[in-house]
Amino acid sequence: MKPQSMLFTIYGEYVRHYGSEIWVGSLTRLMGEFGLSEQAVRAAISRMLRQGWLESRRVGNRSYYSMSPRGQKRLDEAAARIYKVEASGWNGKWCITSYTIPETQRNLRDHLRKELNFLGFGMLTNSTWISPNDLEERVKDITEAYNLTEYVEIFTAEHLGWSDPKRLVEKCWNLDEINKAYGEFINMYHPRYQEMKKKLKAGREIPDNECFVAKTELVHYYRKFLFIDPDLPEELLPDVWLGKEADELFNEYHNLLHPGAVRFFEEVYEAVPVGK
């Protein structure tokens, strides 16, 4: 478990709902529940500061950390996809992004590819990426942030030939691999969910810190689907798609663990004192 990745999970699942800022002592105690040392946590915080994900400030002799605007935007995007509502029907249009970025700016090209992948784009050709979702504004924001507007073109278009829509999807995404990953998630977490339900039904009290660890690990694991599942509309999915079953399991187990997990977080959490 990488400390930096777990920090994203804790900020996204908890801190963003409590003023988005937290004392470093609270962070190290929360991360300690996963066996992470204070040294490892502070090293991860330093990396995130250098990378522009976090911002810091001191109040007296205490350091507090919050997500930067860039980091907050990433958390908002992730939350919208993890806790997504049922989408309306697909309008048949594709968002297309094409770029010609010189080799001298190879690092920015790599950053753009990572951002497109996170948004759920699939690579149709080496420098042409497509998505059936309405992502034009997000691509504009990203290309402006990286100063790549002179190298990138963005379209909304209809596909006229020759592959049918599902065949086009097969060219851009490996849905079999994604389905397999969802199956692995279900096989891992369905027994845990059933066991927890059984304990609660029998009247057994589950310690709040156990709920916190279980819920956070659940969200942390499920976050990986942000990087592999393009969130395709139902019309483009295969007949057998485990994503829906996985979503239902995630939501039910999450709701079961949520009250105890939040109580533990609130016990540990310390925000900036009022008036500071």
Image: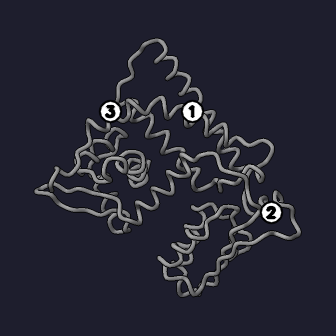
Residue pictured at 23% horizontal, 48% vertical: 271
Relative to 215, residue 126 above or below? below
Q: Which residue is mark 3?
A: 263
In 3D space, how far apart are the residues under numbered discs 3 and 2 (Cα atoms)?
Answer: 47 Å
Colouring of the image: one colour
Amino acid type at mark 1: Tyr
**Gap in angstroms between the C-alphas marked 1 and 3:** 23 Å
Q: CA distance from mark 2 to mark 1?
A: 32 Å
State the residue in front, 38 or 220. Answer: 220
Whether residue 7 sits left or right of residue 242 in the image: it is left
Query: Quick check: 112 above or below 195?
Result: below
| Image-based side of 191 in relation to 235, left or right | left
User: What percent of the width, then of the height, locates residue 100?
Assistant: 64, 84
| Residue 7 x/y as whole percent | 38, 51
Going 37% across and 45% down the picture, which residue do you hit? 14
Left or right? Give the position of 99 relative to 260.
Answer: right
| Within-10-Å neighbours for mark 3: few <14, some 14–19, many 20+ | some
Which amino acid is tagged 2? Leu
Label 2: element kind: helix
Front of the two marks 2 and 1: 2
Q: Which residue is mark 1?
A: 189
Q: Nearer the viewer, residue 257 or 35?
A: 257
**Secondary structure under badge 1?**
helix
Mark 1 vs mark 3: in front: 3
The residue pinned by badge 2 equals 168
Assign a secondary structure to mark 3: helix
Pointer 2 local density, CA inside 10 Å: few below 14, some 14–19, many at least 20: some
- Residue at the spot 35% in from the left edge and 64% down from the top edge: 68
Work out whether mark 1 precedes mark 3 in sequence or the reverse, and give the earlier one.
Answer: 1
The percent position of residue 6, horizontal first and vertical second, equals 41, 49
